[in-house]
Image (tube, rainbow, N blue to C red):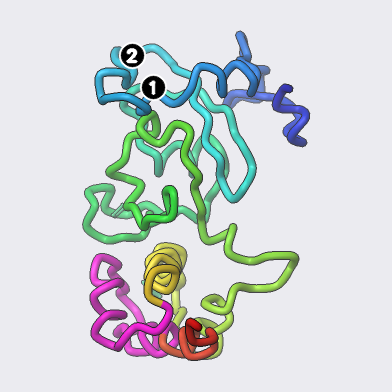
């Protein structure tokens, strides 16, 4: 099985040239993730290493250096431009994505460490052309102004509702405490998340 079996046309670098020594998905899966045992298996040095990231349900083999962050690989190498970067120090939360279901600031995670992981960005929230309930409520409640914080805010909210479908206001505020918003004053964001939770049926 090769990447073309997954609908990816080819592997090209930033200049559009085809990647050399393309590893097939089969080979990547057989090799297994770098982080499966201990940190000792993380790649070192300056060489490029092939990793496999499953982003929004689609597998992407990608070449990374040992010091490439997950945020930069998602945004600059794979084109997930909804992953916003601002501080790149883990302080603003704009780069938040889900890694194996957990909200992670992707500027602080090495891409090699995410090898083999399931990653969800805000682009992956909408399904079959229908916005996720959180996206709908953010729009309804005017929880978006410039929008720069929104993708990260949505992913923190998604992680919250996945584990706690009916959070209190305090729990919502705590869940998004790592996400900075310079525009809204947070109130509309909290209301949007609460409204999304209100539209989720109570657990049986
Ligand atoms: S860019 Fe990652 S936390 Fe600010
Ligand atoms: S909407 Fe502008 S930073 Fe949040």
Circle 1 packing at 10 Å, graded few (<14), some (14-19), many (20+), is: some
Label 1: which secondary element: loop
Q: Which quarter of the frame holds ligand 2?
A: bottom left
Q: Can you name the residue that lies furthest to the top here?
A: 21
The answer to whether the residue labelled 2 contacts the one labelled 1, judged by CB atoms less than 8 Å apart, is: yes
**Upstream in sequence: badge 2 or badge 1:** 2
Q: Residue at x 56, y 40 (%)?
A: 54
Of residues 202 and 131, which is closer to you in this image?
A: 202
Q: Which residue is drawn at 27% across and 61% down?
A: 92
Of residues 125 and 64, which is closer to you in this image?
A: 125
Question: Left or right of 42: which side holds 154?
Answer: right
- Provide residue 41's location: percent of width, then percent of height: 31, 18
Image vertical order of residue 102 relative to residue 108, above or below: below
Label 2: which secondary element: loop
Q: Can you name the residue that lies furthest to the front here?
A: 204
Q: Which mark is residue 107?
A: none
Q: Which residue is drawn at 42% across and 74% down?
A: 161
Residue 34 painted magenta? no
Q: Name the residue under label 2.
A: 46
- Provide residue 141's location: percent of width, then percent of height: 49, 90
- Provide residue 184's location: percent of width, then percent of height: 35, 83
Image vertical order of residue 143 relative to residue 50, above or below: below
**Screen quadrant of the N terminus:** top right
Q: What stretch is highlighted in magenta?
A: 165-193
Q: Mark 1 points at which residue?
A: 65
């Amino acid at each position: 099985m090769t990447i073309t079996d997954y609908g990816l046309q080819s592997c090209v670098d930033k200049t559009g040239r085809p990647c050399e020594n393309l590893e097939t998905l089969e080979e990547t899966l057989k090799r297994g993730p770098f982080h499966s045992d201990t940190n000792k298996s993380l790649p070192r040095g300056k060489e490029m290493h092939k990793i496999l990231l499953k982003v929004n349900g689609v597998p992407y083999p990608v070449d990374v250096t040992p010091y490439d962050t997950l945020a930069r690989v998602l945004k600059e190498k794979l084109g997930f431009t909804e992953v916003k970067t601002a501080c790149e120090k883990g302080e603003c939360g704009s780069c938040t994505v889900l890694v194996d279901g957990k909200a992670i600031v992707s500027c602080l995670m090495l891409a090699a460490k995410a090898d083999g992981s399931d990653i969800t960005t805000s682009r992956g929230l909408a399904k079959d052309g229908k916005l996720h309930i959180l996206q709908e409520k953010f729009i309804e409640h005017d929880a978006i102004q410039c929008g720069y914080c929104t993708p990260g805010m949505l992913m923190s909210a998604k992680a919250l509702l996945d584990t706690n479908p009916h959070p209190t206001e305090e729990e919502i505020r705590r869940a998004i405490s790592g996400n900075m918003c310079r525009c809204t004053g947070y109130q509309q964001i909290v209301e949007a998340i609460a409204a999304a939770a209100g539209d989720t049926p109570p657990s049986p």
